[in-house]
Amino acid sequence: MQYVVYGIKQCDTVRKALKWLANENIDYRFHDLREDGLEQEQVETWLNVLGMDQVLNKRSTSWRQLSQEQQAVSSVPAAAKLICEHPTLVKRPLVAAEQPILCGFKVEQWQQQLK
């Protein structure tokens, strides 16, 4: 099974995760959030499966630059639209196969889910 790793190249956590995947010989494809963008339907799936708190990075600079009205997003479609407009709001890295399965990089969790 090939996994898709969503992130941005400049993110240290994404780089650590990609290095870990390579060291573990796990097949993956990298999807750059800035360069490749996102589809709203795909983001809605992530939000429905993992939850808004898990996918939306409220500690990011991108989040802090949003207006209070934008930060008050409460529905999945509205959050997905916001993420598509500002892809760096995704907590990185996000790993998906048929479904999104991991968000963020925690070695123990990755060992359990990806092996």
Image (spheres, grey):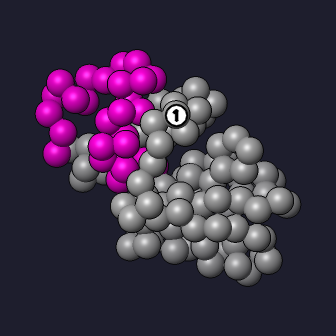
Q: Is residue 10 above or below residue 62?
A: below
Residue closer to the observer: 11 or 75? 75
Q: Residue at x 78, y 52 (%)?
A: 113
Q: Residue at x 48, y 55 (%)?
A: 92
Asked if residue 39 can be seen in this view, the reply is yes
Considering the whole magenta stretch, tell me its main secondary structure. Answer: helix
Residue at the extreme top of the image, as rendered: 75
Quadrant for residue 108, please give it: bottom right
* Among the 4 quarters of the image, the one containing residue 75: top left
Does residue 68 show up magenta in the picture? yes
Residue 32, how many percent across, how many down? 46, 64
Judged left or right of residue 79, residue 72 is left
Q: Which residue does the numbered mark 1 point to in the structure image?
A: 41
Relative to 91, say whether 99 is above or below. Answer: above
> Disc 1 residue type?
Glu
> Which quadrant of the figure contains the N terminus?
bottom right
Does residue 86 appear left or right of residue 53 in this picture? left
The residue sitting at 42% across, 39% down in the picture is 56
Foreground residue, 91 or 5?
A: 5
Q: Nearer the viewer, residue 98 or 89?
A: 98
| Magenta stretch encompasses residue 59 | no
Left or right position of 35 against 106 = left
Magenta stretch in the rendered image: 65-91
Residue plotted at (63% across, 30% down) = 49
> Disc 1 on helix, strand or loop?
helix
Taking the image as drawn, is residue 57 in sight? Answer: no
Q: Position of residue 31 (x, y in %)?
A: 53, 63
- Could you say where residue 55 lies in the image, as x and y percent from the top left? 49, 40
Residue 8, relative to residue 82: is it above or below?
A: below
Apparent side of residue 59 relative to residue 76 in the rendered image (left or right)? left
